[in-house]
Structure formats: C-alpha cells, structure tokens
Amino acid sequence: MLVAAAGLLWGGWLLAGGRLFWVGSPSMGRVAPVGSLVVTRPLPADQPLRLGEVVVFHPGLDVPAVYVHRIEAILPVPGRPTEFRTKGDLNQLPDPWVITRASVVGRPVAIIPAIGWLYRSATWLLFGAAVVAGLSFVLTGGPRRVLLVLGPMLLVAVPAIIDHPFVSGFLYASGQNGNRVVARVVDTGILPVTFTVHGGHPVRAVPGQEVVAIGTTVAHRTVVPVRVAASLPWWGWLLVVAVCLLPLAANAWLSRFAEVAPDVDDPSTSGEAGPGAGGDGGAGEADEEEPAAEAVTDRQPLGRRASRGASRPRSSRPAPARLATEAAGPAPGSRPPGRLTTGAPDHRPMLTVCHCRGSTSRARSTGCASRSRRTNARAAARPTRCATPACRSWW
C-alpha cells in the first residue's frame, strides 16, 4: 500500500514537471558538491529570475549537458527576451554562453549531498538486487548463503571501483615558481580528505571545498604528484572497520539458520521392534540382511543442531546403536560398489542417523550418527547397516 502511494506521488510529481539531476562537476563548490542530488521544480511563468539565483538550465542544442550554475549578470536586450549570464562558484571566468528564460529547466528545491551517487547507480543496484533476490529463492544450503553474503558486496563494490565516490579529488589549476608548486584542488568525494603535494604539508578539505596545496618540484619530472587520502577521526575509522566486517557478521548470522537433516522415523519401521531388536531375541534373526538405507536426493547441510543429544548428561543418554559394515558381497545382478552408471562421481557428505528403540519407550541416540565421508550417492555404493532397523541416511 505504501509502495503504491509512493509511486502515485512520484508519478504526479513527474507529470507536474519535477526532475532529478546528479552533480558531476565541482564548479559549484560546497553549494552542490560532486555526487549531490538536485531536486527541481518548474519555474512559474510569473516569477522573474534574480541576480545570484541558482538555476538548472540547458545551454543549447550544441551542448547536451544540463548545468547547475548561478546567475551572474542580467543582460536586457531591446526587442528580444532578457538574457542571463551564468557562472560556477569556483570558476574564475563566466560561462561562454548566455541563456534565456526558455533555457531554464527549473529552480532547485533541494540539493542533497552524496545521494546523487545512488541515483547514478540506481539501474545497476535495482537490477542486481532483483537478480540476487531471484537466485536466493532457487539456491539452497551453502550456495544460497554464499550468494546472500557476496551478492550485496558486489552490488556496492562495482560502482565504488568505477566511480570512486568515497575518496577523490579534482585539480582545478596549478602553477610553478622556481622549484615551488602551487595547486588548486577540490574534494570531489563523500569523505573528508587531505591533499599533499610532493615536498609539502597535507591540507585538509571537506566535500566540495577548494584548498591550495603547496609543494616542490621533482627532479627530472615534469609532473608533480598530488596525494589524496581519507581524513577521518578515530570513530570514523572504527565505523569503516565495522562496515568492512559486515560480511563476516552476515555469514555468522546466516550459519545459525543452516538447514538440518530432518529427525524422523523410517516409515517401514513405525511398528514395534521385532524379537531381534529386543534383549531376548535370537542371534539368528539379528543377522538377517537388512535393506540398504534410502537415499534422499536433496542435499541436507549439516548444522550444529544435528546432534541434539550432545548437551545431555552422559548418565541419561541411552546406549548408542552401533553401525555394522556390509560383510556379504553384492547381491546377484547388482553393480559392484563404487561404480557409476553415467557421469562423473558425485561426492557428497552423508549423514546416517539411527533411532534406537527400547522395549518400553523410544529414545533417539546421536551415537549412531556416522561421520561425513566421500561416497557416491546415486549408486548407493556403500549401503549402511545398523544394529536396529530404524536407520536412515541423507545424502
């Protein structure tokens, strides 16, 4: 309901002439830093343009870009529409064009720093989020957990590598006097930075601020490097470390919800145990050959809660049933163990859980759980036998 209401408001605002822009150059300084989101509305017909007002305009057909500059001069022309000359706050010279009222796209209602980077990458973020969400419903177990951890990381890392939104700078002008170098630089990133020219002291700047960095020339080099580094307080660096540790925290949180093999009884053994399972049964009945454990095709990841009896006191734990290996050879007509029908071996971890049954009550024992081993799940090359008939394996 809220999404539908927001969509209606957004559509109505667009139909009324509202537009969104993101700032890609530092010409307006701290008024509109690089990466800012500019929200505009149409200019009313009865409202004049004032000197010093910030406007969003389109210079002409030969210039495809849209600019956010300040009106520097009003040029009335007899018999023609009034013309306006614009200029960026950090530019030393005015723009090489003049505009009219028809060139104005709108007046800025709000200028929001840093949000323009999200607007610029909105297509990538929405498409990537849809792909990750769709695959999360298809994958299960370990692959799904890896997707939920690495997917959001890639969504953020790709725009960060391409656009450099966090730490960046722009060299406006530079000059040299002997071996002394003077550089005018602007912080064009989201974070505060320090600029250091070779042989000089670091100069700190906030987003959109212009500073002058002084250094010395480098022998046998015509280009003087300017180093840009993030400048954060101690709590800012702690916040950066916390953000970098988010994938590890997400992995630990998701591992708590790992799927566990279901602890259910075998349908074929839902009745009472036979004489061979009780204490007074004959030994000949216990040696009868049992069918191989049923193989489940769905892969069941092992979680910590697969052995819930481990936390019980040793005195109250029932005696674990033992696993017995197949002593006799393969049945007539069956394939030898370890041989595949088609394809390559499919090695998967196997868990065998035996439900030990007593004469008066039924208890579940974790001592029957065999360790994970590499086996062929499709051919059931190594059938597992238990001392009790209530055993089941998950591949």
Image (cartoon, grey):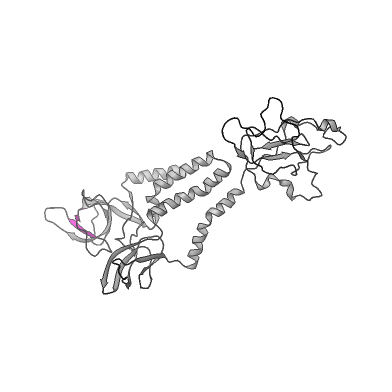
Q: Is residue 121 magenta?
A: no
- Going 74% across and 50% down the picture, which residue do you hit? 311
| Residue drawn at point x = 46 percent, y = 42 percent | 130
The percent coordinates of residue 65 (x first, y second) are 27, 51
Front position in the image: 103 or 143: 143
Q: Residue at x 49, y 67 (%)?
A: 234
The answer to whether residue 361 is above or below residue 23 is above
- The magenta segment is 82-100
User: Does residue 357 sit above or below 35 in this rendering?
Assistant: above
Q: Nearer the viewer, residue 280 or 249?
A: 280
Which residue is outermost to the right? 280
In the rendered image, the quadrant that contains the C terminus is: top right
Q: Position of residue 152 (x, y in %)?
A: 48, 49
Looking at this rendering, what residue extends furthest in the left direction?
Answer: 79
Instruction: Please give the name of the residue rendered at 71% of the width and 32% of the height, measured from the top-left corner.
Output: 292
Relative depth, front residue between 105 and 247:
247
